[in-house]
Image (cartoon, rainbow, N blue to C red):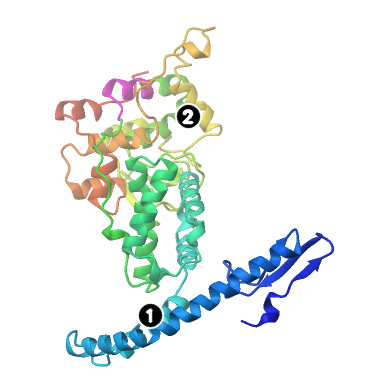
Amino acid sequence: MRAAALKICFDKNKKLYYYSLPPALSDTGKRKRVHFKDERAAKDDIGRIKKEREEGVQIVKRNSTERIRDLLQWDEEMKAVWGVEGGLETLYSQYKNRTEAEHESKKFGELWRSFEGARSPNWSGKSKANWGWLRRLIQSIEGESVVTLNLEFWENWILKVTDERNLKPRSVIDVLGRLSSVWEYGVQRGLVDRNPIKGIVRPRVRAKMPDVLSVEETRAIMECAWRFDRGIAPYFAFAIFGGLRPDYAKDASEITKLDREDIGFENSEIRVGANLDNKTGTKRFVKMQPNLIEWLSDWKDSSGPVCPPNLRRRLEKVLSGEYLAIEGTPKEDFVPLIATTKNRQDIFRHTFGSFFAVGHTREQVREAMGHTNDKTFQQFYHNAQSPSDAELFWDIRPPKD
């Protein structure tokens, strides 16, 4: 270190003494100024640094002979015992190559942006929110090389995040599942060599059956819509007896994007996904059950969109029990047509899947639901129903006017 590097100067603006600390001695790895109230304190600190540096030099000198001897011994052991033909030179070369590869490899942020660019056009509003939350969570590691983000890294990362965010087991599973999707995308496209998330042990959670409508709840909803607002009856019919995705989101709902011409009464099929960027990015055909055909019979010769305007408000008037309440009843006293203990999100689709599973094969269920595998249905949609209840469910038909 040059003596001039620790020269004491006076900062007129701050009215403080300082010296410039070289990058090699700075905790930031960059040159920085160290300020003092008086010149004596600055001189004492420089003296301390020089003393420590000299002590370090002496330690290196005293130990250099032993270190050289140890290195030579290790070099021989690498060749003779461990079978490394080139000894320490080979190991150094491998380390150097690995370090350079890490420096040049793709950053995690690049992998994420590539995944997001390919998949986000098919995301619903809710999916975009969930992925956005996770994106903010991994923001601090976007600049990390993908080759450094191994199994051990992600195990420590998820433990840290779980502790900081107080995540529940199901949330942990969801986070790991989304991260795994990003890595699998990279593997499939040759952007990365492996998916490190695969090796992480997921927390165990008790299986919770999805909420479904009872036969009585289903009949009450359908009859209420039919009697008080027949224009929205097709929406409920497609969701409950057809299993179409009922999301309100403009680009996610299979029902709100449906047109009358997509309903094939002649072959009892619904063409789903013709005008939709759905979750699987594919078009599918749903076979209509006899009772669904009856619920739609009034619209057989009509045209235009299936769903009427003001859909959300009109659906809520049915489900909240407003139509069945005595005139003048306060809103808080309405009796909802779905039990308040049940989670209304996706309950129509869950109901269809659970009742359709009675008497149908896994392949038939997967095709009807538009799933890419059996696991999705078993994990998120299946709530076993009895054959007798299923018979009653599929026999729910429009009231006789």
Mark 1, mark 2: which one is toward the viewer? Answer: 1
Q: Residue furthest right?
A: 12
Position of residue 187 relative to residue 281, above or below, is: below
In the visual, does 197 lie left or right of 334? left
User: What's drawn in magenta, residue-wise?
Assistant: 212-223
**Dot 1 crowding, Cα within 10 Å, few <14, some 14–19, many 20+:** few
Residue underneath mark 1: 98
Q: Residues within 10 Å of mark 2 (few under 14, many from 20)?
A: some
Callout 2 secondary element = helix
Q: Picture coordinates of residue 323 (x, y %)?
A: 47, 16
Above or below: residue 66 compared with residue 355: below
Kindly identify the amino acid type of the residue bearing the numbered disc 2: Gly
- Where is mark 2, residue-wise? 231
Q: Quadrant of the C terminus?
A: top left
Q: Residue furthest bottom?
A: 86
Quarter of the image with the N terminus in it = bottom right
Residue drawn 23% across the image and 34% down it: 383
Q: Is residue 34 visible?
A: no
288 over 111 or under it: above or below:
above
The answer to if 215 sits in the magenta stretch is yes
Q: Is residue 1 left or right of residue 185?
A: right
Give above or below for 192 relative to 366: below
For image coordinates 65% across by 70% down, the residue present is 46
Secondary element type, mark 1? helix
Q: Nearer the viewer, residue 352 or 294?
A: 352
